[in-house]
Image: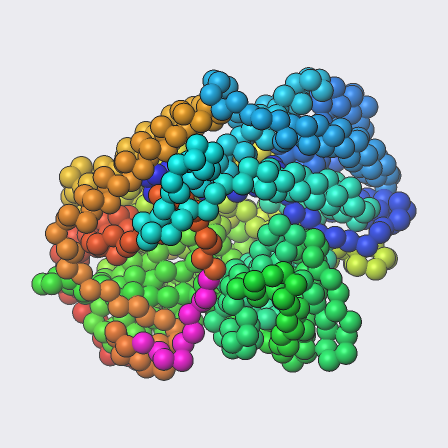
Amino acid sequence: MCPNIMIYKNLLSAVLAIICIGTPFCHAVEISDEDSGKIARVVGFLLSQTHYKRSALDDEISKEFLRKYMESLDYSRMVFLQSDFDEFSKKYGTLLDNLTKRGNVSPAFEIHKRYISRLKTSHSWLEAIINKEFDFNIDETFTPDRTKTNWPKNEEEARNLWRKRIKYEVLGNRLSKRRSVEALKASIKGAASIKKSDGTDVKIYNIKEEKDKILRRYERFLRVRNEMDSGDVLQYYLTALSNGYDPHSDYFSPREAENFEINNIKLSLTGIGARLQWDDGYTKLIELVPGGPAIKSKKLKPGDRIVGVAQGEEGESIDVFEMELDKVVDKIRGEKGTMVRLTIIPADAADESETKEVRLIRDKIKLTDSLAKGQIIDYPSMPRLGVIDLPQFYENCARDVSLILDRFKKEKVNGIVLDLRRNGGGLLPEAVKLAGLFIEQGPMVQVIDSRQRKQVLQDNDSKIGYNGPLIVLVGKLSASASEIVAAALQDYGRAVVVGSQSTHGKGTVQTVMPLTNWVRIKDPGKLKLTISKFYRIAGGTTQKQGVKPDLILPSPYDYMEIGEATLPNSLAADHTDPLNYRRLNLVSDYIKELSSKSNDRIKKDQDFAYILDDIETLKKRLEDKSFSLNETKRLQEKDEDKAKRENRKKERNNRAKTEETIYDVTIKMIQKNIALGEEIEEEEKPIRLKEENNDEEFEEEEEEEGSKLDPHLRETLQVLQDYIKLLDPKKQIAGKAKGIKNSIQ
């Protein structure tokens, strides 16, 4: 399958997982009707009074509130019937606002009760559907993404949708284990066994086993949904209310608030240093994180399954089989220096009865995947270039980037690419500091709140970390604070911005408010709500329209349903007065020529030809989101995809070997002053689980020869080389000794 189309299908798969298994929610304690009403009343009040829109909780919000709530329970639109939606719309469509103001949350539980009833009805059909012999030779289709469709009009239509849903899953399973299915067919016919390329037999596909897995999955889904307590229901309900104002406002349970902070700000947690995954009732270790107790113990490995968790030396072990993942994680996390005892089934255990206990002392774990990192690229007879990859604006990230810049200057780097393609935002003050590393001083962003009060965030430090040629590389996943950095450096004329047609377009500011200040009950949760909007120093906004690069590179992401503009209830784009700032004008004179040279290369570049082909395929896929349930047709599609993939691999491997040399530059290397090309002996690397795959065509492929740089980064470096040549020689800084103050002339 084409790489970029694979990205799309992976995104689609993530959506499907939500449809099948249900959106995750955090288990909460039972909350009384009275306390639930108090929380709802406060949430409604805060949204109407402190949200950026300052919109009253009215009938229009009420209608959206109801729709969002029913969709959050039934994202796939396969459980509720259209008559349910019509009934509740008539009953509550314009009343939820008034009921919320009065602290009445009874509709949440009434609608949830109907949902559970419909879900049980749907579940009653599943065993018969799953155990039925499917005919994969007939022509019918199923559309997994039903988010923009109506609910089924009756039970007959709903049952047929579930039949297609299950058939789609069974067929997908058969296609993913194609070799195993062929082995089964050979066995039935009495033919010789099918072998892998290494001579070993292919495992025979067990139809009953695979169908049983699907049935167990839905049984778990029903059980989990049926066990939702009042706190869980309130979580869904108030999040739907918040989403009625804008897509970034949410109600957080205490656990969700903690996870939000870990994932978006702190980049650390206290635990064992392992990434976990829920797998058929078990909590499985899929990765051991460097520096964590799990990897240091040398007693755990990816694939081990956790079946019991105990606290301290004497704590009783709690059975966690079939327990929701978030609950298991909660039991494993804890204070630094405390003990947790895990009962595990080793990955290589011959029998599930073979368990052992592993004792670990919890410690702070740094989530290193989100730390800034650099690369130095050497080309023969060309300027030495540097790349800084910053996935997120975390605490002290500007300091880390400054360290990389110092190292780049020491290594005599001539130009830098700041790669923000996968940066979804983070701490705004850190983004301001980071942008300030590239200019002398000045404003970076305007922030306007709901009362139209303006705050200007600026860099007041006249010290410049780097004043040489600079490119900011962005994409559709560049959001929030990363867009502020790109916009500021573009408005100053300090950097050439290169990337997709536009960035994500999230130009709003959220705050997380503890509800304990308004509700006198134990742990009422927190409210994340939008309170301000970002505006560029030139007066425009990044909201909804994003940052439009100076040079555009073709990308499939531009054609996917990604970005603020695709989200319901997203705030509108507008503008404000520009600020007074000193434009540097280091870019505008060169954009036309840089763009012309880049376009000429792209037209001749085979990788971009593949990308353009993928874009056309994606467009067709988006026009028709249905999937064939005919096995022959799907196999033909797979074979065509495989042939395309193999032809591309062959073509890439036949190319002349690229001549660049790439050196990694990590914060740890800098701190230990490790020379380029040397490895840090004690630096641990993540240990990840490699899943067994019976389908030879999807076994891990050998690494392709050729450039280790992806096409977009490779072309961006070419643009940077052009930019260096066009600039005044005085500004082609080959690097300066650490500590020398730089300034832009």
Q: Give the number of marks.
A: 0
Q: Residue at x 64, y 77 (%)?
A: 359
Highlighted range, magenta: 679-688
**Left or right: residue 523 compared with residue 201:** right
Instruction: Write the residue at 22% across / 68% down.
Output: 413
Residue furthest to the bottom: 672
* Left or right of residue 595: residue 44: right
Query: Looking at the picture, does residue 679 appear above or below residue 632?
Result: below
Location of residue 669 in the rendering, given as x and y in whole percent from the top left corner: 35, 76
Say which quarter of the image contains residue 643.
top left
Q: Is residue 306 visible?
A: no
User: Between residues 442 and 344, which one lies in front from this camera angle?
Assistant: 344
Residue 301 in view (yes/no): yes
Colour pattern of the rendering: rainbow
Q: Residue at x 58, y 33 (%)?
A: 568
Majority secondary structure in the magenta region? loop
Task: Examine the structure image and report whether residue 460 is included in the region drawn in magenta.
Answer: no
- The spot of residue 715 in percent (x, y) is 23, 49
